[in-house]
Image: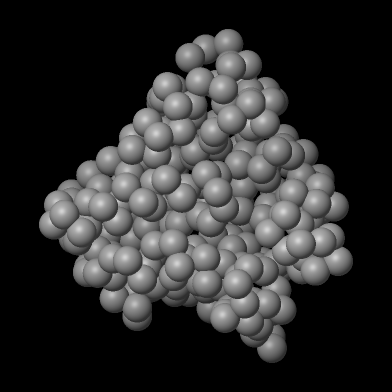
Amino acid sequence: MKIVVAKNYEELSLQAANKVADIVKSKQDVVLGLPTGSTPLGMYKDLIDMNKEGKLSFKDVTTFNLDEYESLPKEDENSYYRFMWDNFFSHIDIDRQRTNIPNGMASNVEEECKDYERRIEDVGGIDLMVLGIGNNGHIGFNEPSSYFAGATHRVKLHENTIEANSRFFGSLDKVPKHAVTMGIKSIMQCRSVMILASGKGKADAIKKALEGPITPELPASVLQLHRDLTVIVDEEAASLLEKR
């Protein structure tokens, strides 16, 4: 495990963007796992700048997003499909056919999950998975549980996750109650993992994930077992760590 403590969010974002850029440059047909949420926005902005300046190309990159809400059309302003195109994909030279996001509108969710895993396997697996972390320690939409979930699957969202995401929807009632997410097994099979966290609100989750017991009650804690984990946090998110 490598822990990088950045001075602030801007430095965190640039450190993360540089790591993504390095792996894109180092391997042809690289496969990236990508998150949504507020934390990676700075990283995406820095990557867009690199692309526009001619320093980085995504034309041979394949991407797989972590998750998607169930029952939200792609065009909905709160879908993760829309998030990725508004905040990243539409600003870079990526091939649309190489972008993969779970279909939350699938009529057969179980088959959609199996197909998503098959697509990952068909390209040889994910080289770098970028993750955020929830206040309750969830990664993707893998919520605290009595067991570690396996492959891509349908999940019922916890009340605190629904509450945390309600700021985007305007009210609790409008937040979807289910989602499709890559599972813990899917994440752990990625060759490298990078987790990002910013702000005091993530300090407790980061401490428990990196220094606490490995337990499905805090899903991110399983990352302690990953063979190639990089943690990039700002000073506030790192404030409770004993080893920095």
Q: Position of residue 53 (x, y in %)?
A: 16, 54
Examine the rendered structure and indicate whether residue 203 appears above or below residue 102. above
State the count of labels.
0
Q: Position of residue 157 (x, y in %)?
A: 78, 58
Residue located farthest toward the left when viewing the structure as drawn: 54
Using residue 15 as the reference point, say whether residue 144 is left or right of it.
right
Which corner quadrant of the image does residue 85 belong to? Answer: bottom left
- Residue drawn at (59%, 63%), measured in percent from left and top? 67
Q: Position of residue 231 (x, y in %)?
A: 46, 32
Q: Position of residue 6 (x, y in %)?
A: 41, 25
- Residue drawn at (58%, 17%), measured in percent from left and top? 239
- Residue drawn at (57%, 53%), measured in percent from left and top? 37
Using residue 176 as the reference point, say whether residue 192 is left or right of it.
left
Which corner quadrant of the image does residue 213 belong to? Answer: top right
Quadrant position of the N terminus in the picture: top left
Using residue 79 as the reference point, say whether residue 82 is left or right of it.
left
Whether residue 205 is visible to the viewer of this picture, yes or no, is no
Residue located farthest toward the top when viewing the structure as drawn: 242
- Residue drawn at (73%, 64%), measured in percent from left and top? 169
